[in-house]
């Protein structure tokens, strides 16, 4: 009886069931692989065209995610609106992410200012003493830009697989910057994408479309 | 024939709302209690009940005034949006309170 009336557990199970389609895993995995493929430019660094391509890929992947949710998941899972507690969590997440983005923008801005100022640039380069340490620092910063926000998102939206995705995406960014080879990020993206695909196929089998003519009282 | 001795008061047990107490309806009400609203398909998936069985239970809850049913169409497909009424939420709260009292009062 306590299991039936454990309302927190009932709500959590209902909420987590909305993620069992694996679409978010597919989305993040696809983003990592696409960014590795499009943004990898060992000769020239990261060109504007490649950055634009990567943004377009992210937008397309996001669109496909939405369409997947509307046309595949919703008709099979059904629709639910969760209570005020979830909405409060979503608002808190939005505020925290807003602050994180501000901090990250500040870091990027300061970095850009440092690059533009020869005096500051010389001091930083002296401090980092060598290309390899500089690259490692940039790689570490890149992964810190990705990892913690994703972990926060995973926590606030109650998405346990999100922690795994956060770690993998951080690792992908780290290796992509450090080693300047896209293959590692593509492999890591695959390690996120493929389990998502398995979940998706399992979801389709477990939740067939409701048949026409079934009573909907 | 054995006799119940002692001073146990089982009146709380008799006052349990049987409409809520039925296991399938209890599962439905518990789920509806923790969400704002949901549709028929989601309830079927979460409770594991068949469509017909769930429909019958929802009818009883609606007749009792515990459930608000809003019917619409999404394209060509009918869609049924369900939420507990204020009376339904109160009934569920009351059920939990009485059941807890009954369980707490049970002798060792």
Image (spheres, rainbow, N blue to C red):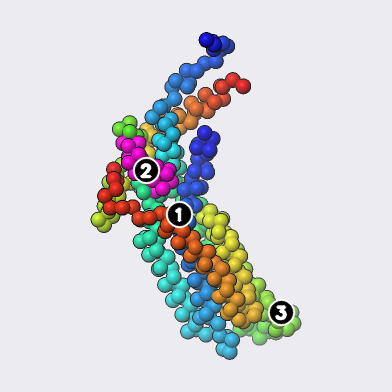
The answer as to whether the residues below labels 2 and 3 share one chain is no
Q: Label 3 lies in what chain?
A: A
Region in magenta: B42-59
Instruction: Indicate which disc residue B50 carries.
Output: 2
Label 2 to label 3, Cα distance in Å?
A: 62 Å
For disc 1, the neighbor class at 10 Å (few under 14, some 14 to 19, many from 20) is some
For the stretch drawn in magenta, the main secondary structure is: helix
Question: Disc 3 designates what residue?
Answer: A133
Name the residue at the front extreme: B1
User: How many neighbours does mark 2 have within 10 angstroms: few (below 14), some (14-19), or many (20 or more)?
Assistant: few
For image coordinates 26% across by 57% down, the residue present is B75
* Among the two numbered marks 1 and 3 on one chain, the one whose residue lies closer to the N terminus: 1
Image: A208 above or below A170: above
Say which of marks 2 and 3 sits in front.
2
Labels 2, 1: one chain? no
Residue A205, position as x, y percentages in the image: 42, 57
Q: Secondary structure at mark 3?
A: helix
Q: Are marks 1 and 3 in contact (CB under 8 Å)?
A: no
Spot occupied by residue A157 in the image (x, y as percentages of width and height): 51, 55
Marks 1 and 3, how far apart at CA:
43 Å
Q: Sort mark 3 into few (<14), some (14-19) or many (20+) by Cα contacts within 10 Å.
A: some
Q: Give the CA distance from mark 2 to mark 1.
A: 20 Å
The subunit carrying tag 1 is A
Mark in the foreground, 1 or 3: 1
Residue A217 location, quadrant = top left
Q: Tell me where residue B4 appears, x and y as whole percent.
A: 54, 12
Question: Could you say where residue B47 lies in the image, as x and y percent from the top left?
Answer: 43, 43
Residue A120 shows up from this direction: no
Tell which subunit mark 2 falls on. Answer: B
Instruction: Tell which tag, 2 or 1, sits nearer the viewer.
Output: 2
Q: Is residue A18 above or below residue A110?
A: above
Label annotation for residue A18: 1
């Amino acid at each position: 009886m306590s299991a039936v009336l454990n309302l927190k557990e009932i709500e959590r199970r209902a909420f987590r069931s909305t993620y069992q389609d694996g679409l978010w895993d597919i989305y993040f995995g696809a983003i990592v692989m696409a960014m590795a493929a499009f943004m990898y430019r060992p000769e020239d660094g990261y060109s504007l065209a490649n950055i634009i391509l990567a943004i377009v890929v992210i937008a397309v992947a996001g669109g496909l995610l939405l369409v997947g949710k509307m046309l595949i998941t919703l008709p099979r899972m059904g629709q639910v609106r969760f209570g005020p507690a979830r909405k409060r969590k979503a608002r808190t997440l939005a505020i925290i992410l807003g602050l994180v983005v501000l901090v990250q923008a500040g870091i990027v801005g300061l970095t850009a200012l440092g690059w533009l100022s020869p005096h500051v640039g010389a001091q930083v380069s002296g401090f980092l003493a060598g290309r390899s340490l500089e690259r490692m620092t940039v790689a570490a910063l890149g992964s810190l830009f990705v990892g913690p926000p994703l972990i926060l998102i995973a926590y606030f939206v109650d998405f346990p697989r999100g922690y795994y995705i956060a770690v993998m995406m951080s690792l992908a960014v780290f290796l992509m910057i450090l080693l300047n080879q896209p293959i590692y990020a593509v492999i890591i993206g695959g390690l996120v994408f493929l389990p998502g695909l398995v979940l998706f196929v399992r979801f389709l089998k477990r939740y067939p479309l409701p048949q026409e003519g079934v009573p909907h009282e | 024939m054995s006799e119940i001795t002692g001073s146990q008061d089982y009146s709380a047990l008799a006052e349990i709302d049987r409409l809520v107490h039925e296991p399938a309806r209890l599962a439905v009400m518990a789920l509806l209690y923790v969400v704002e609203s949901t549709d028929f398909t989601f309830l079927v998936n979460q409770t594991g009940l068949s469509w017909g069985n769930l429909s019958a239970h929802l009818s009883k809850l609606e007749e009792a005034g515990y459930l608000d049913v809003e019917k619409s169409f999404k394209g060509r497909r009918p869609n049924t949006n369900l939420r507990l009424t204020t009376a339904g939420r109160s009934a569920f709260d009351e059920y939990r309170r009485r059941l807890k009292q009954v369980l707490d009062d049970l002798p060792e």
